[in-house]
Amino acid sequence: MIITRFAPSPTGNLHIGGLRTALFNYLYARSRGGKFLLRIEDTDFARNSVDAKDGILRAFDWLGLDYDGTIEYQSKRLEIYKQHIQKLLDSKAAYYCYMSKDELEALREEQRARGETPRYNRKYRDFMGTPPAGIAPVVRLKAPLSGEIVIEDGIKGKVSIQATEIDDFIIARSDGTPIYNFSAVVDDALMGVTDVIRGDDHLSNTPKQILLYKALGFPVPRFFHIPMICNEAGKKLSKRDGAMGVMDYAQAGYLPEALLNFLVRLGWSHGDEEIFSRQALLQIFDVKDINTAPSAYNASKLLWLNHHYLNAQSNDSLRALLEPFGVSIAPNIAAILFPALKERCKTLVEMKEQYLEIMNPPVYDAKLFAKNANQGALDTLAQSLAILQDLAFEDAQTLEESFTRNIAPHKPFLLLRLALLGKGGGVPIFVAMLALGKDESLRRIAALQGAIAAHLGGG
Ligand code: GLU
């Protein structure tokens, strides 16, 4: 059985790179009837934050990424790591190192001065003497002195590292807590993880982890190191490019379906298809289709996908989606406005703004008002009012046709826009009229009459 996991460190907002890693692990396990586990790597007590952890869980919830079993917290597993560190000490695969920070720094300085890469000199690897007093030791792994370590990576292919590249790295700090490479290996092994899919920024950890699996007598999982997400210029993704926290996307009015679809295509492809439902992905996702080249974040594609998924929503589900944005839209108004809003809006936030723009009292665009503040406009508005008074406000098209038939010769649509919406653009004006209802529409037209009259009177 395939068992994957997502193992975030709760030290900051979950970003889209992390979420994409989670998604690939989720899809791979779920598409094969396997298990997808969630592990919170919270052993960095100085940098952990409860908010970050809650943010990860909220994001999983919002996106419907369900995991198997209960969440494992590394902070609750310290005893397990200690036992495994002890096991390595007992088998002499690891040892206590008493080198002080100052001594290590001095050593590094010397090595740098000689033009060498700074690294620990294995001073305590076979140490038999009396340990120096007053130093709490770290634990280091006895890394092999020769040979090579081979990673059979599912994306990068075969990656070989000379053993001489890897020094006797630390596996436990002087306070006994394990470092990431150690706790991750112990957990992945004990949790039965078969496939590790993660960002290729971790590729340099993998040889060390392979050494640890072997030292501990655990089977080595399959690795898939996915290329990073960059901006359109090929540089590291920054906040400005849209590298915001996952829940910021929810707040900006994106739909979870759109974000998932967007993310899966950042580094994975299936022919030249662009639209993937979760159901489809659960059928077709395969790690072998993960791209080997970095992928570029494309903000307009995300908007395009979001527009697509907004359009697919029923009126009722859109009403529900807009509720958290503070707008409650009655079913009859939704039925009138949503077709026009769906066409124009790419996010829920835009939808909310355009909705409020229609429903809130208009603020006249100064230029448009100045251009129309004349006697001709007053006459046209009076004529419009008289015609609209007698018409039924039942559907936008009939209303428009009846109105247009009666008003002649000029069609005062821009003037009506100014009266109802305060501006030149927006949804079709008769749709707005229907949503506002007869009373409010007539009231707004009369209000513009009043404003123009006052302007002319005062001028
Ligand atoms: N806690 C690590 C991170 O957030 C996990 C890396 C891994 O998947 O092994 O980068």
Image (tube, rainbow, N blue to C red):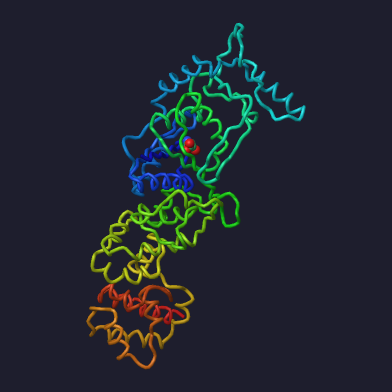
Q: How many marks?
A: 0
Residue 259 against residue 355 in the figure, above or below? above
| Residue at screen point 61% across, 13% down | 126
The outermost residue toward the bottom is 409
Residue 33 against residue 204 in the figure, above or below? below
Is residue 251 visible from the viewing direction of this image?
Answer: no
Q: Nearer the viewer, residue 169 or 11?
A: 169
Is residue 185 visible from the viewing direction of this image?
Answer: yes
Residue 412 % position (x, y): 38, 85
Residue 435 % position (x, y): 28, 72
Left/right of residue 78 with respect to residue 99 in the rendered view: left
The outermost residue toward the right is 114
| Residue at screen point 27% across, 64% down | 315
Classify the position of the N terminus by image quarter.
top left
The outermost residue toward the front is 147
Residue 51 % position (x, y): 41, 38
Q: Nearer the viewer, residue 122 or 93?
A: 93
| Residue at screen point 50% across, 27% down | 214
Residue 438's image quarter? bottom left
Residue 397 % position (x, y): 29, 81
Q: Nearer the viewer, residue 168 or 7?
A: 168
Left/right of residue 293 with respect to residue 334 in the rendered view: right
Residue 343's image quarter? bottom left
Residue 323 against residue 48 in the figure, above or below? below
